[in-house]
């Protein structure tokens, strides 16, 4: 595959059409990021809460009193609940229908096309799949195509596409949760500072 791409001219690889196709794939991944990253953060926060509840010394320093036993018990119960959860990352577990748990196969996960072919429904249980998924994929493709059109067939177009992808993910996460994850904002901050230097 790399050999095939190496033989193509840069004008073709960084054309609006090529970057729009890349945008479809990136948009599919952005749907995963927008859904899972806030859940991953919430799990981390609940872990912090559990540790804080179990920390009697911290309670003593802040409240100048011995920590009630029920706080440590609640912290232990939270830790047990969190440890019983299956691991959640951006790559694992694989995509599943939230209604029936059907594992999404590769051909059911093709950006926009699969949603259209399945008529916006799960292939196993028939539950509606939100329109948001293909809209995010299509919007990312459109934005990547616009970046390529505006910047031209330059390597900088890929950097700008990355910035656009992060901004789109941040906007959607902010819309859903009013949270802007540091995992996305800090790299964007540093990229902006480096670009401005």
Image (cartoon, helix red, strand yellow):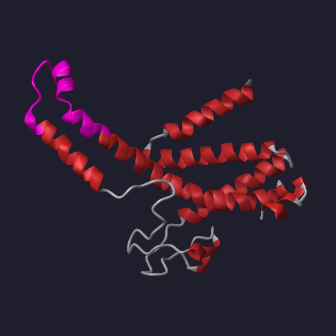
What is the span of residues highlighted in magenta in the rendered image?
Answer: 48-70
- Residue at position x 39%, y 55% from top? 87
In the rendered image, residue 151, in percent from the top left (x then y), is placed at 83, 44
Side (left or right) of 62 relative to 21:
left
The answer to whether 196 appears left or right of 189 in the picture is: right
Quadrant in the picture for residue 112: bottom right
- Residue 172: percent from the left, percent from the top? 53, 49
Picture quarter containing residue 114? bottom right
Viewer-proximal residue, 82 or 139?
A: 82
> Is residue 122 in sight in this rendering?
yes
Q: Quadrant where the N terminus lies?
A: bottom right
Vertical side of 27 occupied by 182: above or below = above
Q: Is residue 49 magenta?
A: yes
State whether residue 136 appears in this view.
no
Where in the figure is residue 147, as x and y percent of width and height? 77, 48
Up-down relation of residue 171 to residue 114 (above or below): above
Is 23 on the left or on the right of 74, as rendered? right
Q: Quadrant of the C terminus?
A: top right
Question: Would residue 43 be found to the left or right of residue 95 on screen?
Answer: left
């Amino acid at each position: 595959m790399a050999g095939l791409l190496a033989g193509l001219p840069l004008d073709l690889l960084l054309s609006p059409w090529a970057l729009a196709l890349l945008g479809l794939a990136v948009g599919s991944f952005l749907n995963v990021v927008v859904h899972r990253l806030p859940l991953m953060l919430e799990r981390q926060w609940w872990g912090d809460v559990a540790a804080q509840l179990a920390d009697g010394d911290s309670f003593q320093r802040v409240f100048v009193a011995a920590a009630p036993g029920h706080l440590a018990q609640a912290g232990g119960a939270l830790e047990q609940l969190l440890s019983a959860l299956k691991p959640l990352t951006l790559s694992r577990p694989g995509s599943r229908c939230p209604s029936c748990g059907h594992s999404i196969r590769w051909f059911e996960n093709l950006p926009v096309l699969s949603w259209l072919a399945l008529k916006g429904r799960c292939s196993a249980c028939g539950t509606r799949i939100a329109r948001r998924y293909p809209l995010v994929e299509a919007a990312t493709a459109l934005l990547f195509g616009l970046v390529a059109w505006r910047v031209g067939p330059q390597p900088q177009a890929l950097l700008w596409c990355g910035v656009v992808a992060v901004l789109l993910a941040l906007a959607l996460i902010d819309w859903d949760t009013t949270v802007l994850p540091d995992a996305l904002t800090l790299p964007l901050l540093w990229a902006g500072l480096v670009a401005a230097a």
